Image: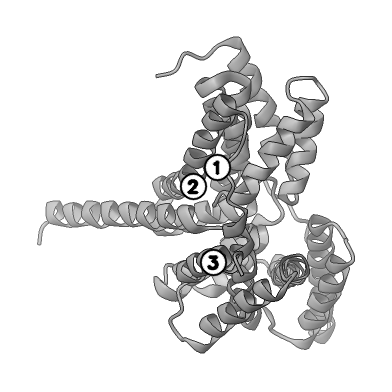
Amino acid sequence: MNLFDDRFIFRLVRKARFLEVIKVFTKLGWVAFGGPASHIAMMDEEIVTRRQWMSRERFLDLMGATNLIPGPNSTEMTMHCGYERAGIPGLFAAGISFIFPAVLISLFLAFLYVKYGSLPAVEPFIIGIKPAVLAIIASAIFKLGKKALKNWQLGALGLAVLLASIVGLNEVFALLLAGLLGAATFTLVEQRNAGRLNCLPLLAISSVELSQEHLKIFLSFLKVGAILYGSGYVFFAYLDAELVGTGLLSRAELIDAIAVGQFTPGPVLSTATFIGYQLGGLGGALAATLGVFLPSFMFVWLLNPLVERMRKSRFLSHFLDSVNIAAVAIMAAVLFNMGWESIVNWQTFVIAGLSFIYTFALKKSNPIITVLGGAILGYFLSFV
């Protein structure tokens, strides 16, 4: 086989992987209900368990590191997964594919809202989805936790983060504190056992006509996307200050936008599409969508190659281990809080119970079936 043949085969493999990334994340984009913890759980099942694009340890490292940068963490994880499978083109393909279904749905709902002044009634379906995704999250916590729990000290650290998160400690602060505390402690113990004590190394990370109005929308959402930490509720708080506070949007319109974010799949930041359409039509929707997601693509592009280098440093490796167990603990806290809010009657209890049985009793359960089953059950049980 000559060099030309090798290059031809390489291009075919690269193209096949690129198309695979698009296929996988478009599918997830249509069914990823339940918030970031549920999205991460679905990715773990699809990417690590079923397709084996990377090891669970690598997935954990990327998840832990991603929690420390601004932006929608689960969406950024799709970009990491795409990067691992198909390089930089895969990064953009995965992110865009995952975002696109939610953006499309939000755009359609925004059109209906502007035209008719109301949103469709989908509450029965959402009521069923929420308890169903609890089983998906629990399954991911179990599998990721087994890899993250390397010793009893990390277990104690994770338990502390879990309790702190349940009582309301900011998740970014919890991750950073756990990472630094664990890295310092484990490095000192190693050096003491080796009979030497050195200074701790420092962490150094190094066809729509657009108008002035659309540029203003773009910059507003770009600013939010670049500094956003925390949950979707933090995102809405930023929007309240950025848009309601400046008179661009009424609070009632923002509340309706929040409702859209709750019952569309994929990232809650796709609400930006809905709001952008209200502010500036189709051009405004595109400007808002691009502005809020663009920083995430840039952050992941810069971060992904650094995670492997961090693993080569003993101090930073301990930092990642500590952040990883803290990230799993935060997922467990999310599971607890979601369970408390979602299981409110016998119907939701039945949906949650059946979802757990299906997820844990079958070796090859499918999260997509869990979500669709929960939606259907929620709809029919709402008549009982």
Dot 1 or dot 2, earlier in sequence: 2
Relative to the observer, which residue lies in front, 84 or 284?
Answer: 284
Relative to the observer, which residue lies in front, 303 or 260?
Answer: 260
The dot on residue 156 is: none
Residue with the mark numbered 1: 297
Please name the residue shown 69% across and 57% down the image: 67
Q: Residues within 10 Å of mark 2 (few under 14, many from 20)?
A: many
* Element assignment for label 1: helix
- Mark nearest the camera among 1 and 2 is 2
Give the left or right position of residue 210, taking residue 127 as reference.
left
Q: Is residue 309 visible?
A: no
* Element assignment for label 2: helix
Residue 344, position in %: x, y?
Answer: 75, 69
Residue type marked 2: Gly
Q: Is residue 221 visible?
A: yes
Residue type marked 3: Phe
User: Cα distance, mark 1 to mark 2?
Assistant: 8 Å
Residue with the mark numbered 3: 380
Please name the residue shown 49% across and 69% down the image: 373
* Element assignment for label 3: helix
User: Cα distance, mark 3 to mark 1?
Assistant: 40 Å
- Check whether the beta carbons of the residues at disc 1 and disc 2 lie within 8 A of each other: yes
Answer above or below: position of 339 versus 292: below
Residue with the mark numbered 2: 95
Give the left or right position of residue 260, taking residue 199 as reference.
left
Quarter of the figure with residue 242: top right
What quarter of the picture does the N terminus occupy? bottom left
Residue 203, position in %: x, y?
Answer: 75, 55
Kindly give the residue lying farthest to the front in the view shown.
384
Quarter of the figure with residue 166: bottom right
Residue 339, position in %: x, y?
Answer: 73, 71
